[in-house]
Image (cartoon, helix red, strand yellow):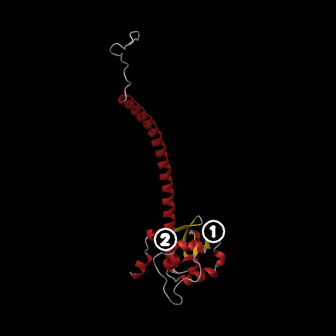
Amino acid sequence: MQARALSLVPVEHITRAILVLRGHKVLLDTELAALYGVSTKRFNEQVRRNRERFPADFMFQLAAEELAPLRSQIATLKTGRGQHRKYLPYAFTEHGAIMAAMILNSKRAVEMSVYVVRAFVKLRELLSSNRELARRFAQLEARLDKKLTEHDQAIAAVLSAIRQLMNPPTPRRRGIGFTADLEENS
């Protein structure tokens, strides 16, 4: 019962851990190590021993500038030796995460690799549905802009007519009395 509960990690949890770095959807080594049930140190040790299985499109090491925004702004580091990372983390693409499960060669790693693949697939589906939604939104926006332009022109014409009615032209009157010009046509 305990092993089954550990092996069932919701795909949503993994999906939230996926980041976009350098234009790739990736999982960091700490997340993969936790999913596969090993320490980050042992996980990275296995990766280094099998470096030939991880080309640049499977895995890359983060630069310090990439890591800075990912660190928590609230939490403080624990004091003491060995309490924080010595090396920059590795980022694994979908294929790199699967390859990592293969080099770990444990039952948990194999089980979790299925969840990792499902999480990447789900994220890919969400992104494609968002693109479709964005395309439809752009079409709707274009139609609304066209209709709003037509309505704006109609409203401007109505406002112009109202202004003309509010300011009627002053009627020309003939002067009264002896100063009147009798030759004037009224």
User: For this view, does 111 lie left or right of residue 60?
Assistant: left
Closer to the camera in the image, 88 or 48: 88
Name, please, the residue furthest toward the left: 177
Farthest residue toward the bottom? 81
Q: Residue at x 47, y 49 (%)?
A: 137
Q: Report the residue at 35% width, 30% height from top.
A: 166
What's under tag 2, amino acid-wise? Ala
| For residue 165, side relative to residue 97 (left or right) | left
Q: Image quadrant for the N terminus?
A: bottom left
Secondary structure state at the residue bearing disc 2: helix
Label 2 Cα crowd, 10 Å radius (few <14 / some 14-19 / many 20+): some
Give the x, y percent position of residue 93: 57, 69
Query: Who comes first in sequence, dot 2 or dot 1?
Result: 2
Q: Residue furthest right?
A: 52
Q: Residue 62 in the image: x percent, y percent?
A: 60, 74
Name the one closer to the observer, 183 or 49: 183
Residue on which disc 1 sits: 57
Q: Which residue is mark 2?
A: 17
The answer to which image quadrant residue 158 occupies is top left
What kind of residue is marked 1?
Answer: Asp
| Image point (60%, 83%), residue name | 45
